[in-house]
Image (cartoon, rainbow, N blue to C red):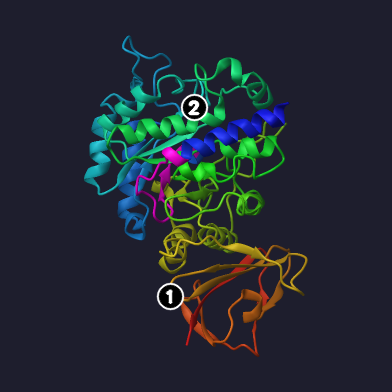
Amino acid sequence: EESNMAARLLLFLSSLSVGYALRNGLQLTPAMGWSNWESSGCAVNEDLIKANADAVVSKGLLAAGYNIIGIDDCWAEKERNASGYLVPNGNFSSGMKALADYIHSKGMQFGIYSSAGAWCCQHTMPGSLGYEWLDAQLFAEWGVDYLKYDGCFMEDFPTVLKDSPNRFPFTPPPILRYPQMAMALNKTGRPISYLCNFPWQFWKQNTDPSMGGDWVGEFCNSWRTGGDARPGFSSALGYVYQSETYAKDVPSGPGRWNHLDSMEIGNNHSNFYDKNGNLQDPSGMTENQEQAIFSLFCLVKSMLFIGADATQLQGHSLRTLTNTEVIAVSQDPLGERGHLLNISGVTGDNDVWMVNLSNNTAAVVLLNKGNSASSISFTLADLGLMGKTYNARDLWQHKDVGTITQQQGWTSSNISAESVVMLKLTPQ
């Protein structure tokens, strides 16, 4: 019965997408920016946001492409005003319009947060359920350019699917709430990029990533592929591999991208605790680990959002985040998402990832997940690149490193533990 109801809801979404889709012309390449959640959580105020906006400019991050400054949860009072509008709390005493103006004056876009439930995730401010049109118009009046729309305080999915005929359209089930906000945003007439933090929960619930499938790209510029990011290399790597689970059924492309949550590169702060009350791995990552994660985020075309305190970014973390040769893979106009390859002889802790790029070029990431150095080999046939010889450029060493022929292939020797080699291949 529940599966039948799920199928009927998906049929409804498919019919809706024929007559309406987001199509706002935004995020033709994956969005890039900064958000406060991973570094400050609910301890957020306008001075913190301004300081990080200033740092994004002064440290060369804006020049590298990070042009969105996003506020996450906990920015509003717990109750709406008498007219039903959200009210910024005392930490934003100058108002959101003034903050948006400040960020715009720096040449950046202003991002804000809400949720499709009755409350936002920390239960400190209302969600937008039932107020989608009002909130969208308010965001537009403030000068918002980007909305992260979370998925907290929504009913258990099987219950919703079973009961939805008795409730729709008065209280739409979660799967229908995201298209509703999309329509509200478009109705404002202001271009507002739209991140949906929901569908992965629906796919996980149904143990089938095709449930919901392609509809999310009809209504969202981007969508999360998992829960909140946590510090550390193994956690970040897990998000990359989890995103691959949904990549076929929920394809990325211009205007519609998967998002693996904010990057933990440079973040030595944790908002997550283990069962004993200790902070989870707040120590950050090594340079090799950060390069590996950044390479993969760019190759799978995740949105690139910095989770660290931008005022504290320095050293190898800042160098990693501003590697424009690697960023160019993310922002390549072909808009194809990269994938994990199944190559004979590449086993154990070694993997090969590959993405096609514009002008018949390609990028390859050779990943050693293990605890000791190893070598990884591939041929052009493994990559599906036939009939030509390719020049190879190492995007972390910033130098040309040789040629790859159809007969000879390529081997990268002595790849350090938990490290990558990232190559761009250009036909001769």
- Residue displayed at 49% across by 83% down: 427
In the rendered image, the vertical position of residue 132 relative to residue 102, given as above or below: above
Residue 254 x %, y %: 43, 55
Amino acid carrying mark 2 in the image: Ala
Tell me the quarter of the picture where residue 181 sits.
top left
Q: Nearer the viewer, residue 298 or 417?
A: 298
Residue furthest to the top in view is 82
Amino acid carrying mark 1 in the image: Asn
Q: Nearer the viewer, residue 115 or 295?
A: 115
Main SS, magenta residues: loop
Secondary structure beneath label 1: loop
In this orientation, does residue 408 appear?
A: yes
**What crowding class fits label 1: few (fewer than 14 Cα within 10 Å), some (14-19), or many (20 or more)?**
few
**Where does the magenta region start and end?**
18-37
Q: Is residue 31 magenta?
A: yes
In the rendered image, which residue does mark 1 sit on? 359
- As drawn, the label of residue 116 is 2
Residue 287 x %, y %: 55, 62
- Residue displayed at 57% across by 58% down: 293
- Residue displayed at 64% across by 25% down: 161
**Sequence-wise, which precedes: disc 2 or disc 1?**
2
Q: Is residue 202 left or right of residue 29?
A: right
